[in-house]
Amino acid sequence: MDYVDLRSDTVTHPTPEMREAMAKAVVGDDVYGEDPTVNRLQEMAAAMVGQEAGLFVPSGTMGNLTAILAHCGRGDEIIVGKRAHTFLYEAGGVSALGGVHSNQIMEQPDGSLALEDIQAAIRADDVHQPVTRLICLENTHNRCGGTFQTPAYTRRVCDFAHERGLKVHLDGARLFNAATAQGVPARDLTEGVDSVTFCLSKGLCAPVGSVLCGSREFIARARRIRKQLGGGMRQVGVLAAAGIVALEKMVGRLGEDHARARRLAEGLRAIRGLVLDEGTPATNMVFLSLAEEVPFTAREVAEKMKSLGVLVGVVGERRFRLVTHYWVDDEGVEKAIEAFQEALA
Ligand SMILES: *Cc1c(COP(=O)(O)O)cnc(C)c1O
């Protein structure tokens, strides 16, 4: 059965063009820096985010971990949102593997970190305290609703950080969704950051991979850390080739996913028993909950919908996350709306 799969944009399969590019990719040993396809992807990626250099990594998690370990030593501290992917969903890697301490602060509803809260979290020069090194931002913000930050906000945090001798890392897993939603080039959202990761494998459909970008000196350090983490890959141009297609062909169409998310939200808003989050969708994610009178849990509704050919993300007892992507077309959106209707009837 062909499901309409709205659980996440991580479920995307590579496009036929990607499979063809993968088959034809010219490769070399990337640990020697000799894979021309990887080198090309890294250069393209860096240029798109206005940084000097890029590093292909197997996952966003490894990209963030590599970046944080390249910025921080053992016992150093990062300032990170309580609902940040890095804090919630990366298995505590920065502390488990890097001895890096995290100071979590509550995000604003839009996923931003307020400057006052960052200021209050910065440690004093005192032997009792860890040393603050790095501020971690996320754009778009997954747990805060796929919300996006503006170029001005990012710039403000970077200026603030740099005046205090701190660095800024941006987890931009869905950076191109943030750029698309605002009609700005991605590099406007990375101006001033010391490092940024973005994902090739979510809405951009590549089968694997993220790119970490930063200064040449930073990426040279990150390359050693990637090797320590076991992320030095060999003839990985076969994967980078799909990443190149992702950057060339898939970035420009993300607006279609956002439009479908809006249509999906519009359809669901009309169904009694569903309560959509205010302002949803900001990008390609629709967040909603079951109204109090509904006698089912989200899991029960999801099971029913599965039998109707629609997969949805359950992110709480009574809460859903629906993510649009390349493999969900207009018909799929209508089918999902009808399935909700039927599941709640
Ligand atoms: C998906 C995601 C990542 C990286 O996840 P991987 O599954 O390791 O590629 C990082 N940050 C955010 C915000 C994400 O949504």
Image (cartoon, rainbow, N blue to C red):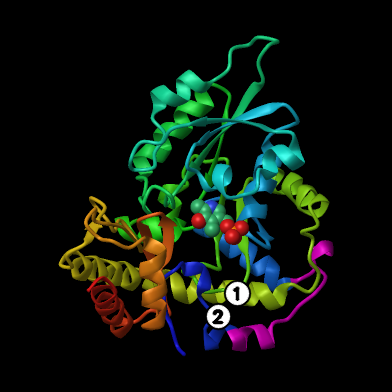
Q: Is residue 30 magenta?
A: yes
Q: Indicate the amino acid at tag 2.
A: Pro
> Tag 1, which secondary structure?
loop
Q: Quadrant of ligand 1?
A: bottom right
Q: Which residues are magenta?
A: 19-35
Other residues around mark 1 within 10 Å, as few (<14) / some (14–19) / many (≥20): many
Give the image location of residue 255, x and y in percent. 32, 69
Quadrant (top left/top right/bottom left/bottom right) for the C terminus: bottom left
Image mark for residue 125: none
Determine whether the residue tagged by mark 2 lies in a helix, strand or loop: loop
Kindly identify which residue carries mark 2.
14
- Mark 1 beta carbon near ligand 1 (under 8 Å): no
Looking at the image, residue 310 lies above or below residue 56: below
Q: Residue sitting at 36 percent across and 76 percent down?
A: 305
* Residue at image location 47% in from the left, 68% down from the top: 9
Give the residue displayed 68% in from the left and 11% down from the top: 128
From the top left corner, tell me how far across and down residue 190 is, in percent. Answer: 47, 47
Image point (66%, 43%), residue name = 92
Q: Position of residue 13 (x, y in %)?
A: 54, 79
Q: Residues within 10 Å of mark 2 (few under 14, many from 20)?
A: many
Q: CA distance from mark 2 to mark 1?
A: 5 Å
Q: Mark 1 or mark 2, which is nearer the start of the sequence?
A: 2
Give the residue pinned by disc 1: 207
* Left or right: 290, with 311 as reference point: left
Q: Position of residue 24 (x, y in %)?
A: 68, 87
Q: Are marks 2 and 1 in contact (CB under 8 Å)?
A: yes
Asked whether residue 191 is drawn in magenta, I would say no
Q: Position of 342 compared to 164: left or right?
A: left
Toward the front, the furthest residue is 295
**Residue flagged by tag 1: what amino acid is it?**
Pro
Left or right side of 141 for 63: right
Q: Nearer the viewer, residue 66 or 7?
A: 7
